[in-house]
Image (cartoon, rainbow, N blue to C red):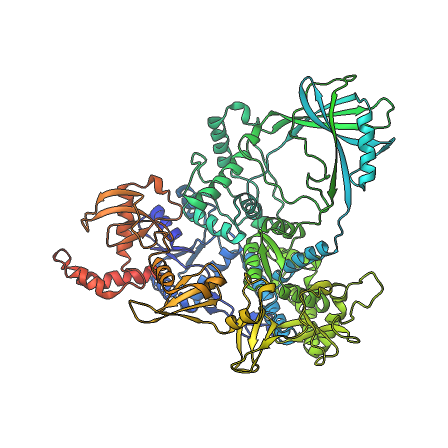
């Protein structure tokens, strides 16, 4: 018997069908062990020896693999065809060796697609484990561990509020912070464009001013309204004739098929997917056999796939769309061992797969791969130059015509942001007329001038990074590797180092402070060149050109003393150094000669950076006499929202306590009294500052408000404001309120109605029965109708007792009765769903038709254990 080990259960199930009798295919469910998160897991003094520890939740699966391995003749490691896949195979082998369950014959096979031909061909051509790739994995894992477990404690001790640092994570964060600095330093520049609306033979077109008063002008030449009006008047007064018509043919070649990076970029641009979501969906498509492996930096396609693509093009279009020779693309990957085939469909006759996001991503992969083998687009660009009689002023009109669409008939690559400083019309700040057709014109013609326009523009700052543009920038700089980008960006979000606003990254206060700390004290380790150079060294390891321990030694030799040096410094010294480092940001020159550090709240105090329990802030040197503070993120001394201390609103006549408005870590709030017993209430965003008087503040600190006792239960109904806004509460159940005003105005009748609506699904039908998407007759098992339903987690089929979710890549529109019954049978064989109560099972077993059910319980439990392992 041959034991085959893969990563996922979906992959295992498919491959076992392809291999047939004599093979047992088990899933490892990803990595089976890792470095334990504690000091000493990597030992630099012992040649960087590593202590690996199996994941606790993989114990059952490892036991199952070990039990099967003891009776197997051959172990076939068939994990993914990349460095991570090689590492998983190595870990499985090492675990089996320790348990003395490793078969004598161990083989490694890889396939780029989960199709029967690809799998069988791989099985016929096994190899040994790639030691170079394993060494590269160990080096990367050790580096990430050493950086995380050496640098993060420094952050925790010296920079309160900081959460972690990472080899690639921190450099990606620096990119985002650096872009924000560029935006803050940017000063908009005014400029004007002058254009003429022209007409020739009844066809209108736009011409822009390119020469004025005898000199060529660029985008920023005309910088004020006065000059623009003069230029407009000169164009209006001139009689323009055509002095040249130049037509040039253009050819646009299709982009190559997707790599991991370009797939993430294009899915972000066109589908709005995050990098992590793109990879999850692509993983599902790969496991379903729809696309080839999605972690790759190669752009080439298999010869058979190219032939299939050319055939599909000819079938879909005609012979003119198929180039004379197949297109060959060259991989830019630095390491040929990792430059696998590009991402493509496994079957070019299949133009659709799955539903929802899976269908959308598959369509993107399909079109890109097919377009990569299509004919080039042929275009024609026409440039017309017009001059007035004196030759002092000139206009230019451009147009572009598609003569033959070629690949553009199917696919056009998305574009990233315009360049920094671009105007609203495009890169040059001028109207984009390239896509417009011009009328037929020749030298000597004098088109009619219908109108002249002078328009004001301002240069724009560089745009913040989107996921697509950040991934592209990281790849350009050689920071990290495409397969890790999704996880890196997700970590930045999880750490709250960045926020997303309109799909753009904005550094959070903590992210900016951490970056400043690392730039000041660990500049080398967050520099772009150093990080890219370290990636090159790791690639040398995977290519067999360098030893992994030598690379680690070179890194550790300088890194360890540097962290020890910073750890010895006092927190106050760290804060003082950051105060000087951040001076241009925190205390910029005001331009009037005044001291940018002067406290705006007192006469002689000076501002400086201070460290606190919840992070850094700016405070006055005269504290506690002067309580002026402002958050670290309030760059440039924005005093409008600074905190000058509590603002007294009045005194509560009943308690005699002082009521004040204050600023806290989570925003403004009101407080009655002092100390631990003080009552506090956040100031909601929908309460304007002008309306926050003593009466409103007292209402806020008095929450929750008792509306009354529910007429049916007799229990209290409370109205209050929580983390997610205003709400009603009754007997452990909640209903949302629309505004803060409703918290104080909602009466009993309204409250009862709102709670009832919430219990019934808020009027959105959550509690009502839904119509099935399709029906497939009665179930032979339950005798009840088999239905296709839309559920919270996607479409599913049900026979009244068992629910089976459709595979993510399955198309609900093509589901038939046979497939539905098969899904239900497979789900029933796995036993009860997690969390299902046993009494329900007993009631079902009591039916006459199910008398033998108790005898089958042990088998069902075993199947359920295997499925959940």
Q: What residue is rendered at 27% in x and 59% in y?
A: 831
Q: Is residue 654 left or right of residue 531?
A: left
Residue situated in front as seen by the camera: 483 or 694: 694
Q: Quadrant of the C terminus?
A: bottom left
- 360 up-or-down from 689: above or below: above
- 619 up-or-down from 286: above or below: below
Residue 270 in the image: state x and y as whole percent: 54, 43
Q: Is residue 465 left or right of residue 444?
A: left
Q: What residue is rendered at 55% in x and 33% in y?
A: 373
Q: Is residue 774 left or right of residue 512?
A: left
Is residue 70 visible in the rendered image? The answer is yes
Residue 256 in the image: state x and y as whole percent: 58, 39
Residue 319 in the image: state x and y as whole percent: 52, 23
Q: Is residue 380 left or right of residue 91?
A: right
Residue 211 in the image: state x and y as whole percent: 82, 31
Residue situated in front as seen by the camera: 772 or 388: 388
- 339 up-or-down from 547: above or below: above
Residue situated in front as seen by the camera: 673 or 190: 673
Q: Quadrant of the N terminus?
A: bottom left
Residue closest to the far front: 653
């Amino acid at each position: 018997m041959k034991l085959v080990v893969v990563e996922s259960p979906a992959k295992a199930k498919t491959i076992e069908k392809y291999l047939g009798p004599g093979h047992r295919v088990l899933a490892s469910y990803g990595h089976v062990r890792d470095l334990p998160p504690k000091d000493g897991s990597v030992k630099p003094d012992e040649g960087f020896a590593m202590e690996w520890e199996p994941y606790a939740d993989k114990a059952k699966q490892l036991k199952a693999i070990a039990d099967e391995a003891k009776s197997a003749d051959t172990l076939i490691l068939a994990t993914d065809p990349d460095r991570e896949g090689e590492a998983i195979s190595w870990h499985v082998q090492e675990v089996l060796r320790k348990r003395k369950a490793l078969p004598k014959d161990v083989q490694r096979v890889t396939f780029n697609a989960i199709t029967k031909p690809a799998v069988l061909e791989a099985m016929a051509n096994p190899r040994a484990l790639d030691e170079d790739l394993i060494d590269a994995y160990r080096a990367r894992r050790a580096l990430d561990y050493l950086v995380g477990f050496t640098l993060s404690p420094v952050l925790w001790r010296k920079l309160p509020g900081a959460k972690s640092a990472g080899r690639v994570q921190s450099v990606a964060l620096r990119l985002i912070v650096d872009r924000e600095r560029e935006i803050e330093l940017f000063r908009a520049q005014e400029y004007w464009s002058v254009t003429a609306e022209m007409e020739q033979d009844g066809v209108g077109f736009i011409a822009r001013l390119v020469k004025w008063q005898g000199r060529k002008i660029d985008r920023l030449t005309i910088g004020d309204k006065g000059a623009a009006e003069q230029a407009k008047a000169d164009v209006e007064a001139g009689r323009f004739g055509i002095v040249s018509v130049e037509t040039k043919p253009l050819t646009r070649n299709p982009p190559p098929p997707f790599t991991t990076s370009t797939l993430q970029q294009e899915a972000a641009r066109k589908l709005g997917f995050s990098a992590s979501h793109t990879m999850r969906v692509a993983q599902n498509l790969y496991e379903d056999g729809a696309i080839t492996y999605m972690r790759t930096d190669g752009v080439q396609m298999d010869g058979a796939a190219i032939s299939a693509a050319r055939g599909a093009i000819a079938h879909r279009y005609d012979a003119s769309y198929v180039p004379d020779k197949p297109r060959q693309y060259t991989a830019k990957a630095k390491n040929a061992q990792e430059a696998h085939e590009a991402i493509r469909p496994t079957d070019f006759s299949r133009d659709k797969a799955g539903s929802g996001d899976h269908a959308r991503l598959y369509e993107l992969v399909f079109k890109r791969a097919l377009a990569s083998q299509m004919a080039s687009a042929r275009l024609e660009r026409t440039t017309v130059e017009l001059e007035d009689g004196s030759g002092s002023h000139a206009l230019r009109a451009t147009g572009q015509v598609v003569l033959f669409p070629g690949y553009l008939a199917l696919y056009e690559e998305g574009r990233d942001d315009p360049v920094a400083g671009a105007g609203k019309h495009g890169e040059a700040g001028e109207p984009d007329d390239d896509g417009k057709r011009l009328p037929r014109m020749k030298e000597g013609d004098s088109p009619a001038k219908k109108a002249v326009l002078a328009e004001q523009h301002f240069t724009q700052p560089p745009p913040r990074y989107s996921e697509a543009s950040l991934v592209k920038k990281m790849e350009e700089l050689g920071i990290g590797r495409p397969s890790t980008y999704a996880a890196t960006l997700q970590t930045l979000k999880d750490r709250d180092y960045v926020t997303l606003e309109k799909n753009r990254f904005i550094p959070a206060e903590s992210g900016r402070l951490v970056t400043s700390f690392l730039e000041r004290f660990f500049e080398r380790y967050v520099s772009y060149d150093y990080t890219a150079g370290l990636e090159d060294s790791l690639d040398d390891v995977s290519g067999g050109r360098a030893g992994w321990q030598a690379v680690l030694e070179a890194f550790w030799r300088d890194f360890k003393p540097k962290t020890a040096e910073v750890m010895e410094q006092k927190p106050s010294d760290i804060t003082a150094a950051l105060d000087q480092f951040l001076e241009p940001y925190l205390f910029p020159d005001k331009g009037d000669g005044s001291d940018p550090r002067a406290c705006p709240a007192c006469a002689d105090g000076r501002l400086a950076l201070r460290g606190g329990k919840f992070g850094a802030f700016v405070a006055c040197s005269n504290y506690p006499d002067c309580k002026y503070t402002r958050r670290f993120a309030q760059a440039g001394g924005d005093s409008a929202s600074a905190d000058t201390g509590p603002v007294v609103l009045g005194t509560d006549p009943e308690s005699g306590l002082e009521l004040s408005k204050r600023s806290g870590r989570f925003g403004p709030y009101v407080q009655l009294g002092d100390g631990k017993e003080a009552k506090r209430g956040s100031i909601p965003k929908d309460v304007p500052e002008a309306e926050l008087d003593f009466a409103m503040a007292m209402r806020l600190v008095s929450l929750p408000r008792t509306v009354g006792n529910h007429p049916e239960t007799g229990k209290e109904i409370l109205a209050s404001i929580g983390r997610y806004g205003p709400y009603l509460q009754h007997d452990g159940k909640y209903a949302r309120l629309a505004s803060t005003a409703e918290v104080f105005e909602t009466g009993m009748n309204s409250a009862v109605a709102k709670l009832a609506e919430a219990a019934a699904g808020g009027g959105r039908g959550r509690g009502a029965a839904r119509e099935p998407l399709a029906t497939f007759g009665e179930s032979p098992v339950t005798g009840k109708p088999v239905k296709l339903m839309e559920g919270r987690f996607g479409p599913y089929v049900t026979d009244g007792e068992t629910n089976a979710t459709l595979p993510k890549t399955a198309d609900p529109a093509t589901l038939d009765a046979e497939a539905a019954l098969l899904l239900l049978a497979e789900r029933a064989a796995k036993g009860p769903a997690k969390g299902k109560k046993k009494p329900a099972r007993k009631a079902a077993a009591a039916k006459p038709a199910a008398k033998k059910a108790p005898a089958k319980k042990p088998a069902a439990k075993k199947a359920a254990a295997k499925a959940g392992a």
